[in-house]
Amino acid sequence: MDYKKAGVDIEAGYKSVELMKEHVKKTMRPEVLGGLGGFSGAFSLSAIKDMENPILLSGTDGCGTKVKLAFLMDKHDTIGIDAVAMCVNDVVCAGGEPLFFLDYIACGKNYPEKIATIVSGVAEGCIQSGCALVGGETAEHPGLMPEDEYDIAGFAVGVVDEKDLITGANIKAGDTIIGIASSGVHSNGFSLVRKVFKITEESLNTYYDALGKTLGEALLVPTRIYVKALKSVKNAGVTIKGCSHITGGGFYENIPRMLPDGVRAVVKKDSYEIPAIFKMLSEDGDIAEEMMYNTFNMGIGMMLVVDSADVEKTLSALKSAGDEAYVIGHIEAGEKGVTLC
């Protein structure tokens, strides 16, 4: 008896690391010390020593049951982008710059080529967000997970100067809410998505004119990363007063998280076109409108609160970063919460 006969192939693990090195290399920043394969990832803080009061930020998350679609479609090159996006988008909500990222992949059986493909997506997410992939773990779990399945999660660390920290404390009545478009369902609500569409290989490969693609292609679109968008707004000289990453819990849970006591967000539902995938979910699943807004991003992946005088400058900065954005509401005095009208 040996470890391989018990279900863990150490040689496959070595091969996975070798195959992923080319992808990891693309994410390197000057601050990264050493290479892939050490017991820890080393990252120099020399680049932030000129900040008045540097604050470290962190975020950790996974992709939920969205990975089920990757299994069925046998498409594994984008799910890693989701893992990065879910973490770095939380970091930028506080005004931070993502510095480095680590991933964790648990699998029933280590297929080196598949693992390397997953990591290629992680690397792409790191490139999009400007952070380095400094390490990770691939754990083979025979007997715990089916051989052809895996799960992925990640952890990001970023930094912000305390004077640039986005806290929401200065939000006041009369401020404007700007919504930045999502790329689709992102990585939340997929347990409900899978109930509505009864996910099968056949259903995922069905083409819909309303979507302009197959259902599977529409659902597997990776979560949009908003690092460049928020950096563009900051570079335009705009002070972002509040920021909300619209993830699990949709509008009702996430918008109040950026608000101080004494103010309320008012969001106009007709201020932008809701993407077709959400209309399909609502109609096919007979899902009440309130539940839709309490589960999904409804086409808005990130919300910013800015002074009303900075609206045009903000929209212009977001457009220059390649993002589509809309004025979707305002702040008024009242009990902390959100009103959809």
Image: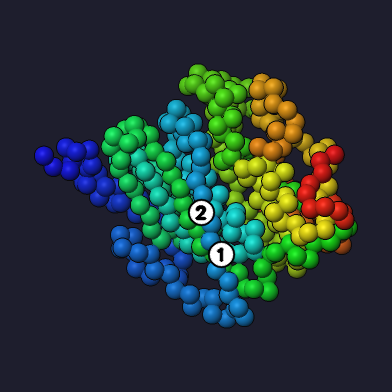
Instruction: From the viewer's side, name the closer residue of 120 and 254.
Output: 254
Residue drawn at (69%, 22%) of the image: 286
Residue drawn at (21%, 46%) of the image: 11
Give the number of the disc on residue 57.
1
Question: Is residue 59 placed above or below 288 in the rendered structure?
Answer: below
Instruction: From the viewer's side, name the closer residue of 114 and 255.
Output: 255
Residue drawn at (87%, 58%) of the image: 173
Residue 63 in the image, given as x and y percentages of width and height: 51, 42
For residue 265, say whether it is visible.
yes
Colour setting: rainbow
Q: Answer left or right for 136 relative to 59.
A: left
Q: Quadrant of residue 24?
A: bottom left
Question: Is residue 158 placed above or below 16 in the rendered structure?
Answer: below
For residue 182, say whether it is visible.
no
How far apart are the two marked residues, 2 and 1, measured between alpha carbons? 11 Å
Q: Answer left or right for 292 relative to 270.
A: left
Q: Quadrant of residue 182?
A: top right
Q: Secondary structure at mark 2?
A: strand
Residue drawn at (45%, 41%) of the image: 77
Q: Quadrant of residue 33?
A: bottom left
Residue 237 in the image, given as x and y percentages of width and height: 75, 68
Instruction: Report the amino acid beneath label 1.
Output: Leu
Q: Are marks 2 and 1 in contact (CB under 8 Å)?
A: no
- Name the image quarter holding the C terminus: top right
Residue 140 in the image, given as x and y percentages of width and height: 30, 43
Instruction: Report the amino acid beneath label 2.
Output: Thr
Instruction: From the viewer's side, name the closer residue of 185 and 295.
Output: 295
- Name the image quarter holding the N terminus: top left
Residue 239 in the image, given as x and y percentages of width and height: 75, 66
Q: Answer left or right for 30 relative to 166.
A: left
Crowd around label 1: few <14 · some 14–19 · many ≥20 (10 Å): many
Residue where numbered disc 2 is placed: 60
